[in-house]
Amino acid sequence: MRETNMATALDTTAKQAEPEQDGLAPVVAVEKVFKSFAGRKVLNGISLSVNRGETLAVLGRSGTGKSVLLRLIIGLDTPDSGAIRIHGHATAGLAIDQMGEIRKKMGFLFQHAALYDSLSVQDNVAFPLEHHRKDMPKSERADRVRQLLAEVGLERDMDKMPSDISGGMQKRVGLARALALEPAILLLDEPTAGLDPISSGEIDELVLKLQRERKMASIVVTHDLHSARTIAGRLALLDKGDVVIEGTFEDLQQSDIGFVKEFLKQS
Amino acid sequence: MSDRGLTPVAGLNPPFQPRRVEFLPSVANYATNLFNGFFEWFGSLGIFSWQVLRAAVTPPYEWRELVRQLDEVGSKSLPLVAMAGAAIGVILSLEARYSLSRFGAKSMFPATLVYSVIQVMGPVITGLVVSGRVGAGMGAELASMKVTEQIDAIEASAINPYRLLAATRILACIVMLPLLTIATDTTALLTGWFAQAMVEPLSFRQFIANGFNNATFSAFLPQTFKTAVYGLIIGLIACFQGMRTRGGAAGVGRAATNSVVLASLFLILADVVLVKFILVFFP
């Protein structure tokens, strides 16, 4: 089953939208970013960029700062130095409401989904719409929620509470919520972590389908090499806060760097 | 033989090395950490208060969440404060009757009860009861949301958590505390009168007329509305403790406990200042 899913997913990889180089600034640009926590260096001056329609997978061992990178991009943490630009606009020093305007263009899937446990599945997905699409009639909003949940295959579970659904389903709800405002940028933190191979394959297929249809710029943080190879056109391997290598899967395979070889071997 | 009277066996009982007791440096470190922690806490509270204030006065306003919180703080605390008020009324009635009888001042009973309930006991009891129920609830709820990244998810959805979560809760506490105090006062006076009427005939009309004889609004209103400050303290501390939580389930427990303990402590300290303020400005 996993092989079937993988085969389908890999087949669709080839059909991924080509990144659009329209001569403008990258959608997301991380420039020489440093970040430390309690004196421990987590990110050591890394630079990365993602264009429209492109998916970048950030790989690495646990604790190498992959999730921190996503938190910095969406502004939940601030870099010690360096710059993060979204659509060419630096996010440093923005007030929470100004940053909110930028965040409306971004969808974030948390590692553990981070669903609001007091709200039902459909209310979780409706939450961003209720706050940012007040002009939208209620019936239209409800249709949109139904459509989003149908896209992630959960239209029958919309009245359930987050505690009543599995981890994989929670991730799908999280994904539907991340897509509610039709973001231009999608940030996925370990979308397949802790899932069985079938659910993991389904999430991969779903992400690919969404990329094809919406042409979003996506950054996927994962240590699942199969998943990264399936959904991302470009991969960046992090170690000790530095980007060890950045390129296609084939570039990684051809690399002579010891850490890259070891990572590919162990994965 | 070693210093402990044992034959040394390699690696098992090496010669006794008395440990140097570094008492003074450890006390100094502890004092320094305590001092730093104290100022860091107040500094963080100041920044948090500014963020909440700024979020509260700028649109969009979270009316629906505010109404939900008014219900959560007000309606759901009402039975508890009413019961606390009822108990206080009976206790004060019993105590006052006994004490006043000893001094031959039984006729002062209604005024004594009214003044002690409305000026002292009602506001403080309401504050402490709400601090226990609402402070712990808010602290634990927000702490749980923090450790499960729900607050981050709110922020990532381009919603200001200070506006949605903190401002609404604090405002609900400020609005509901005076109303809950009126409820506490009312039940305390009712049960206080009832406890007295069970022993000696006393009509409720007579009780009220005597109790509020020569009373002015300035004698009661500031005492009741000072509880809005209690509400500010309870809401602010519970939200602050909850939203800065770290460390999983243990952190949630700590946040709930600290919310109640600190809110109760600051509430009593604030009362000292408020009483003096009221005596000066509403003599």
Image (cartoon, coloured by chain):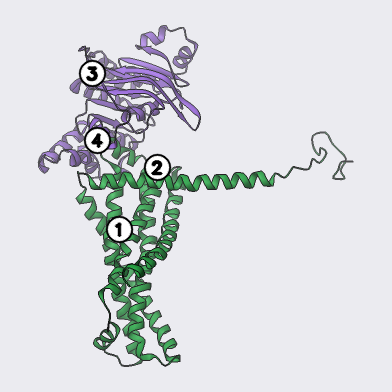
Chain colours: A purple, B green
Tag 3: amino acid: Arg
With respect to residue B116, does A68 lie above or below? above
Tag 2: amino acid: Val
Asked if labels 3 and 1 touch by Cβ distance under 8 angstroms, the answer is no
Tag 4: amino acid: Arg
Q: CA distance from mark 4 to mark 1?
A: 31 Å
* Category of crowding for the residue at label 3, using alpha-carbon neighbours closer than 10 angstroms: few (below 14), some (14–19), many (at least 20): many
Q: CA distance from mark 1 to mark 2?
A: 24 Å
- Disc 4 versus disc 2: nearer the observer: 2
Picture quarter with the C terminus of chain B = bottom left
- Disc 4 versus disc 1: nearer the observer: 1
- Tell me, for residue B173, which label it has, or none: 1
Q: CA distance from mark 2 to mark 3?
A: 33 Å
* Place of residue B185 in the rendered image (x, y in percent of width and height, measured from the top left): 31, 74
* Category of crowding for the residue at label 1, using alpha-carbon neighbours closer than 10 angstroms: few (below 14), some (14–19), many (at least 20): many
Q: CA distance from mark 1 to mark 3?
A: 47 Å
Q: Nearer the viewer, residue B144 or B268?
A: B268
- Tell me, for residue A52, which label it has, or none: 3
* Place of residue A190 in the rendered image (x, y in percent of width and height, measured from the top left): 36, 28
Tag 1: amino acid: Cys
- For numbered disc 3, what is the local secondary structure? loop
Asked if labels 2 and 4 touch by Cβ distance under 8 angstroms, the answer is no
Please tell me which residue is depicted at 40% across the width and 49% down the height of the picture: B241
Asked if labels 4 and 3 touch by Cβ distance under 8 angstroms, the answer is no
**Mark 4, chain letter?**
A
- For numbered disc 2, what is the local secondary structure? helix
* Category of crowding for the residue at label 2, using alpha-carbon neighbours closer than 10 angstroms: few (below 14), some (14–19), many (at least 20): many
Q: CA distance from mark 4 to mark 2?
A: 20 Å
